[in-house]
Image: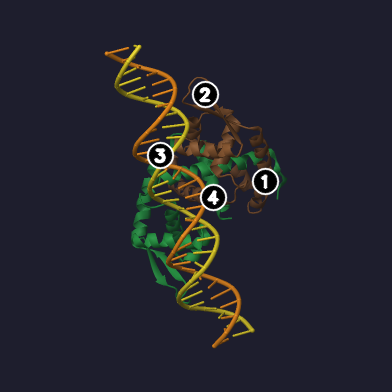
Chain colours: A green, B brown, C orange, D yellow
Amino acid sequence: MPDLIHDSDSAAAVSSLRSAVMLLGRRLKHQRVDESLSPTEMSVLGTLARCGSATPGELARKEHVQPPSMTRIVALLEAKGLVRLEPHPDDRRQKMVSQTEQAEAMLAESRSKRNAWLTTLAEGLDEDEWETLRNAAPVLEKLAHL
Amino acid sequence: MPDLIHDSDSAAAVSSLRSAVMLLGRRLKHQRVDESLSPTEMSVLGTLARCGSATPGELARKEHVQPPSMTRIVALLEAKGLVRLEPHPDDRRQKMVSQTEQAEAMLAESRSKRNAWLTTLAEGLDEDEWETLRNAAPVLEKLAHL
DNA sequence: GAGTGTCTTTAGGTTGGGTAATGAGTTACG
DNA sequence: CGTAACTCATTACCCAACCTAAAGACACTC
């Protein structure tokens, strides 16, 4: 572990990161791209889009949520026709969750809505700042999944 | 507004930022530096430390929270002796909120706890990645307050 | 084949916000 | 002036998104 992460710059950065993430999270909760779909539900769909299909338990671990929460989320997504539940081939305790074609369409549509949100946000940041955020995005994601 | 924020790289970055922020936010909620002090309460104390003193309304706007929520948060902080409420000099509707000496001590203590958290986090990131995060922290904060 | 462990689900609770409505105080305007 | 309209804080109530504890179904081990 490098020494430089112990200096006061980094302590300030962590503090700043902490409050910025909490604040942004609160705001994102309201400014959701698709009505009637919570941020976590969106996130689960994104994960499914990347990973193909997974069991509820796997999804819970990936989203850092407890299993009962994921059960409820999956049930909501199923009720909306965005996800399909099939029996697990080897283990009858588990289920396989996969996204429907409808989910794929919805993700595509939400991508365009996200651009609108991004456009309004862009007014407050200059090009360098966006560059910084683009670089930071994958690191933040890694950090979140640590 | 630069064109480059419309390319697919930026769309992906926004998507990635979005889910990373939500996920980190969830985790930060649990991994709080000081027991019995919510992230928002911490954030309010931080704001007070920077700005000296403010009215509940000002705090609500800065934290992007509705006034009733800030009333409750301030009341909790006052009950814990971290904040002092005084009548506003010019306007008897308003109140002035300022931090106590106890709050200052607590912030100092929490800074050291934050270093412990940071240390465990550091194990998962290399030096370049930390560099990226340090650069991104102020931008994220600006974005959050937009 | 009995016991232990694992995956999901059910039931119930907690927390951190929100909206609507009230009360007190200020400002603007006739 | 005085009254109407606005603003600030608060109260009362509500809701969403998580949590923990416990149960039920199945799998593994010995």
Which callout, 4 or 1, points to the residue nearer the camera?
Answer: 1
Q: Secondary structure at mark 3?
A: helix
Q: Give the residue pinned by disc 4.
A: B24
Q: Tell me if mark 1 has few (under 14), some (14-19) or many (20+) residues whose alpha carbon lies within 10 angstroms of its own.
A: some
**What type is the residue that disc 3 sits on?**
Thr
Q: Tell me if mark 2 has few (under 14), some (14-19) or many (20+) residues whose alpha carbon lies within 10 angstroms of its own.
A: some
**What type is the residue that disc 4 sits on?**
Leu
Q: Give the residue pinned by disc 3.
A: A119
Q: Give x and y (percent) for residue C2.
A: 57, 84
As drawn, the label of residue A130 is none
Looking at the image, residue B82 lies above or below residue A60: above
User: For the view shown, which residue lies furthest in the right direction?
Assistant: A3
Query: In this orientation, which residue lies closer to the viewer: B22 or A98?
Result: B22
Query: Which numbered disc, 4 or 1, marks the residue that appears first in the sequence?
Result: 4
Residue at 53% across, 36% down: B74
Query: In this orientation, which residue lies closer to the viewer: B14 or B98?
Result: B98
As drawn, the label of residue B88 is 2
Q: Tell me if mark 3 has few (under 14), some (14-19) or many (20+) residues whose alpha carbon lies within 10 angstroms of its own.
A: some
Query: Which numbered disc, 4 or 2, marks the residue that appears first in the sequence?
Result: 4
Which callout, 3 or 2, points to the residue nearer the camera?
Answer: 2
Q: Tell me if mark 4 has few (under 14), some (14-19) or many (20+) residues whose alpha carbon lies within 10 angstroms of its own.
A: many
Q: Are marks 3 and 2 on the same chain?
A: no
**What type is the residue that disc 2 sits on?**
His
